[in-house]
């Protein structure tokens, strides 16, 4: 077996550059701090893993919605869902579950965790990352070693937070945990929810049997 998608035969490493990196390299590539470039690429790669992992929420959440909404025209309903981001999808699932009378404490907790992970994903996706000294360095001061940190800056509020490789690993694990938490709830869900008439089944939820 072979994959036609893996067609890059170059052995040159890909890096992620900041705007200032590209400005510097435009005039003199020798002035680039390649250690910083390598660290930025590693941090961005792991940040991308969080974003990609959260993206798998959509299909699972959609099946819960379709099971409860039970539309006659599933294709049209799916097309409507496809126009929503994961936040409004979770809002719709919560609303439909509440109307169906199955929004218990367990379900609320699962939805709350999904929303927390999605908020984290959004912060990572839309924030900017930069490198700075952990402690301010005064001009003319003599310091044997300087510690640097990578920080995530919120574009809207301007708030910053340190991000670490261990923290991003935990973010990936949290995303996996939130997904599997909803998946595990599916067994209870199909017992307490009314059996749909039109739902044909999907990857995660099977159509009810008579």
Image (cartoon, rainbow, N blue to C red):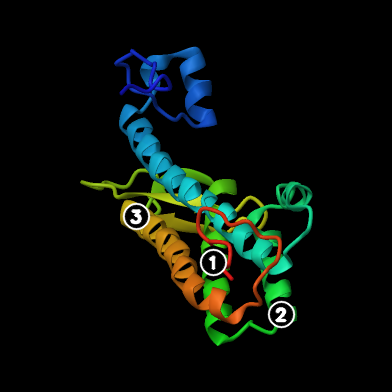
Q: Residue at x 41, y 59 (%)?
A: 176
Q: Pick whichever of labels 1 and 3 is earlier in the sequence.
A: 1
Visible in this render: residue 27? yes
Query: Which x, y percent locates residue 132?
Result: 42, 46
Q: Pick whichever of labels 3 and 2 is earlier in the sequence.
A: 2
Q: Residues within 10 Å of mark 1 (few under 14, many from 20)?
A: many
Query: Which x, y percent locates residue 136?
Result: 40, 53
User: Which image quarter holds the N terminus?
Assistant: top left
Q: Nearer the viewer, residue 15 or 208?
A: 208
Q: Residues within 10 Å of mark 3 (few under 14, many from 20)?
A: some
Visible in this render: residue 138? no
Q: Secondary structure at mark 1?
A: helix
Residue labelled with disc 3: 169
Q: Residue 100's mark?
A: 2
Q: Residue 44's mark?
A: none
How far is mark 1 from mark 2, CA to CA? 20 Å
> Is 47 located above or below residue 104 in the figure?
above
Query: Which x, y percent locates residue 111?
Result: 57, 72
């Amino acid at each position: 077996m072979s994959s036609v998608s893996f067609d890059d035969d170059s052995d040159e490493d890909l890096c992620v550059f900041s705007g200032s990196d590209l400005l510097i390299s435009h005039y003199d590539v020798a002035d680039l701090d390649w250690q910083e470039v390598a660290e930025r690429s590693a941090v961005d790669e792991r940040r991308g893993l969080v974003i990609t992992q959260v993206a798998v929420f959509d299909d699972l959440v959609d099946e819960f919605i379709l099971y409860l909404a039970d539309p006659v025209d599933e294709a049209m309903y799916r097309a409507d869902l496809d126009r929503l981001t994961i936040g409004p999808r979770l809002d719709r699932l919560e609303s439909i579950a509440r109307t169906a009378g199955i929004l218990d404490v367990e379900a609320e907790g699962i939805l709350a965790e999904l929303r927390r992970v999605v908020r984290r994903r959004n912060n990572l996706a839309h924030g900017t990352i930069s490198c700075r000294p952990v402690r301010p360095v005064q001009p003319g001061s003599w310091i044997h070693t300087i510690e640097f940190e990578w920080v995530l800056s919120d574009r809207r509020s301007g708030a910053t937070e340190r991000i670490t490789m261990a923290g991003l690993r935990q973010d990936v694990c949290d995303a996996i945990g939130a997904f599997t938490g909803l998946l595990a709830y599916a067994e209870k869900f199909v017992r307490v929810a009314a059996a749909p008439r039109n739902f044909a089944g999907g990857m995660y939820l099977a159509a009810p049997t008579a």
